Image (cartoon, grey):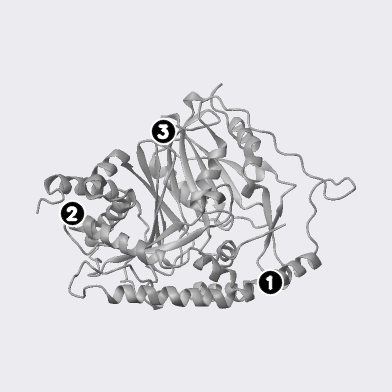
Amino acid sequence: MQRLSGLDAVFLYAETPTQPLHVTLCAVLDPASMPGGYRFATVRDHIASRLHLVPPLNRRLVPVPLGLSHPVWTPATDLDIDQHVHRAAVPAPGGEAELAELVGTIASTPLDRSRPLWEMWIVEGLADDRIALVAKLHHAAIDGVAGVEQMVAFFDLEPVPATAAEAPAAEPSGPTESSGPTEPTPLELAAFGIGTRARSVAELGGLLGRTVRSTIAVRRRRAALDPLASDDIGGATPLVCPPTPVNGAIGARRTVAFARLGLDDVKAIKAPFGATVNDVVLAVAAGALRSLLLDRDALPAQPLVAACPISVRAQADGSATGNKLSTMFSHLRTDLADPVARFEATIRAAAASKDEHRLFDPDTLAGWAEQADPTLARLLIGTYSGRNLADRHPPAINLMVSNLPGPPFPLYLAGAELCHAYPMGPIMEGAGCNITMMSYRDSIDVGIIAAANLLPDPDQLARRIPAALAELAEAVAACPPGAT
């Protein structure tokens, strides 16, 4: 029995009929290298043979009676692979548009909480005889960085799959033989919940003090900024964001689109500025959004605010699952027309956001999540979502932008070569678009997921992402740093 952390549990409490909180990965594969050729059963059996290497896929939720504490994970001893690995096909011609439509449909459906919280879909009928793996895993079980690390267990470095290590034998639970782990009784869960709730309450005073001190430090930092320097605007502040067409109450249906960037192109731009890949990612996202909003006569005068998830997973926790996240709020300088000026302002804005984020204890967000009451949290979030209250106030954020590191070498699933891996995070109430990027080999694969009622055509944003990178590269070549 393993209790969910507060942050893990909040992803459960925040889930509503219009806000399923799972993460999704669309991996495009070339089965030409599969020994014996492609067969659905081969891929399904391969996944089944590796399940024991990925702990989050082998457990299910058990609620604590009366909501005395966050739920617990217990081993799933009756997992049926056919309830989790499914077969699907896209219609001709099997291009990215058809794949994106199917992925949007899969991402729109919540996971069944009576089972382990994951699904995989093997998608056939893609152009060039390719297939795809669409994996869906609840955010309560894992964050993006850990998800990438855990999913690698299904892949190999060579087309011929290695023999996976056998699952460890279950330890006996007592002096007599047992057929496997037993589910905790309601009394055990209640006692466990009371104990963990008492510890959370005892930590509240220290958490409040740390939060107040950090907030004061951020306010002092901002007070020292030059009010006459328009680009010296510090880190971004949630709850005071300009409205855009992608902000408002979200519906249940999701739309999806894909894009790709050349990793060498990104590195060539960042190098002369001493910038990071993430700086380029934010600047490119800002350029694409500016173009889209201009075309729709909806560009605000103020910069947008992006929530950027930050992993706070220590190296010692590298094999741990669950969420180890914090959030950095950064300006997207959609208000600046010149690409180089936008990039330089993005670098400064991201640096300011990182400085302000460092003023907070990395466990602050997790600490407050520990205080969440299950019953009250569900009631408040359900009311907020059900009454479309996100339409009645300024956006808390405009969108989410994430950048994940992926492997620089080729990977193979059951012998099929991984060509592209498009990650997609969840959509939150009020912010109907999520842009997630992940590097793989010599490219950065971009997954865009949106609420269909706010952004029905995310492909219009997707095609602007490589165009924004090309625009920035051309402008940097014409006006390198120090040229003016």
Q: Specify the quadrant that holds the C terminus.
A: bottom left
Q: Are marks 2 and 1 in contact (CB under 8 Å)?
A: no
In this rendering, position of residue 185 left or right of residue 47: right
Q: Are marks 2 and 3 in contact (CB under 8 Å)?
A: no
As rendered, which of 211 and 117 lies closer to the eye? 211
In this rendering, position of residue 365 left or right of residue 450: right
Res. 127 mark: 3
In this rendering, position of residue 175 left or right of residue 299: right
**Mark 2 Cα shell of 10 Å, populated few (<14), some (14-19), many (≥20):** many
Q: Residue 14's image quarter?
A: bottom right
Amino acid of disc 3: Ala
Amino acid of disc 1: Gly
Q: Specify the quadrant that holds the N terminus.
A: bottom right
SS at mark 3 in the image: helix
Precedes in sequence: disc 2 or disc 3:
3
Q: Residue at x 60, y 76 (%)?
A: 376
**Residue position marked by numbered label 1 in the rendering:** 67
SS at mark 1 in the image: helix
State which mark lies toward you, 2 or 3.
2
Mark-to-mark CA distance, 3 and 1: 49 Å
Q: Position of residue 59 (x, y in %)?
A: 68, 51
Q: Are marks 3 and 1 in contact (CB under 8 Å)?
A: no
Q: Residue furthest top?
A: 36
